[in-house]
Amino acid sequence: MPLNSSRSDSTNAEISASDSSLSTHAPVGLKVEGLRVQFGQQSNPVLDDLNLSVEPGEIIALVGASGCGKSTLLRTIAGLQTYHGGKIQYSRSSGNQVDCAFVFQDATLLPWRTVVENVRLPFELRRGAKARLSSAEIDQRVSGALRSVSLNEEHWNLFPRQLSGGMRMRTSIARALVTDPSLLLLDEPFAALDDILRTRLNQLLLELWAVQHRTILFVTHNIAEAVMLSHKIAVVASGKIDELIPNSLLWPRDASQRTSVPFAQLYSRVSQALSDAAIDNEGKAN
């Protein structure tokens, strides 16, 4: 069903892979209203009357305890999870088709394909205008995506087993960017990396956003990462947005802000919001 439908039991929910009427490089706004997701008839809803508004070009961090519904929300927006109530709408004159890309916690690269072949894969799977690009145009897109994530050309013909964890994740991000999505969804993409590499890829994400201002939603358990990368931080608890915290740190962001007083103050506020949400959940459980 179309993502703006309010019909319950959205068994056919999906996001169109491409639409020739969509303008590339244009960020998309997103509004989620009364979203409900339930796994099985007898279970409690994972998401229950969840509401969230995202302005075009915003970066929203989703934080919360494990099992609170963060990843389910991301997967539902991506069309990977059906929903059973509410609606998802986009601020696009062309309706509710939007180019969307998803980056998982694991790089999910095909082990029998090289870096270039993995990044090229979306064009082999897609239908519509971008599937009709010439081989030369696809090659240009692939090389451009790989350069954008600072992956050296000497690594392009290697297989995933020959790459470091950071290079595998850069390849995964390049694969997400190669089709020029308007909406980028990331589910803890840096969770398995060490702190130094994680900080570098945080900076890479900021640099990529500065170029095209894509709308980004990302899940993280790292409060510092949420503060560093976002315009707003959504605290998820019990299947709802418990609090939406604005991030007033100045742009462009750089490493020096991590030791600033405003950064520490926002970190403390997010930490307290997570603690309060956990206490509320314990009270409800009892």
Image (tube, rainbow, N blue to C red):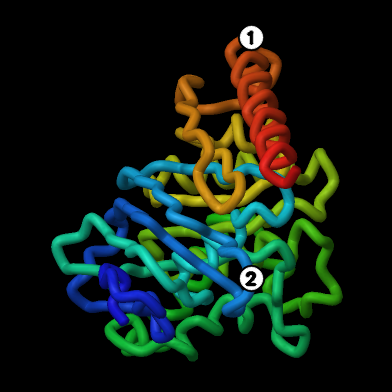
The residue positioned 36% from the left and 46% from the top of the image is 54
Q: Quadrant of the C terminus?
A: top right
Q: Is residue 110 left or right of residue 231?
A: right
Image location of residue 118, percent across then percent down = 63, 80
Q: Amino acid at mark 1?
A: Val
Give neighbour class at mark 1: few <14, some 14-19, many 20+ (Cα, 10 Å): few
Q: Is residue 201 left or right of residue 83?
A: right
Q: Amino acid at mark 2?
A: Ser
Numbered tag placed on residue 20 in the rendering: none
Residue labelled with disc 1: 261
> Eyeballing the image, is 281 above or below 24?
above
Residue labelled with disc 2: 43
Any part of residue 146 in sight: no
Image location of residue 233, percent across then percent down = 53, 36
Under circle 1, the secondary element is helix
> Eyeballing the image, is 242 above or below 17?
above
> Eyeballing the image, is 171 above or below 80?
above
Of tags 2 and 1, which is closer to the observer?
A: 2
Any part of residue 49 in sight: yes
> Which of pointers 2 and 1 lies earlier in the amino acid sequence?
2
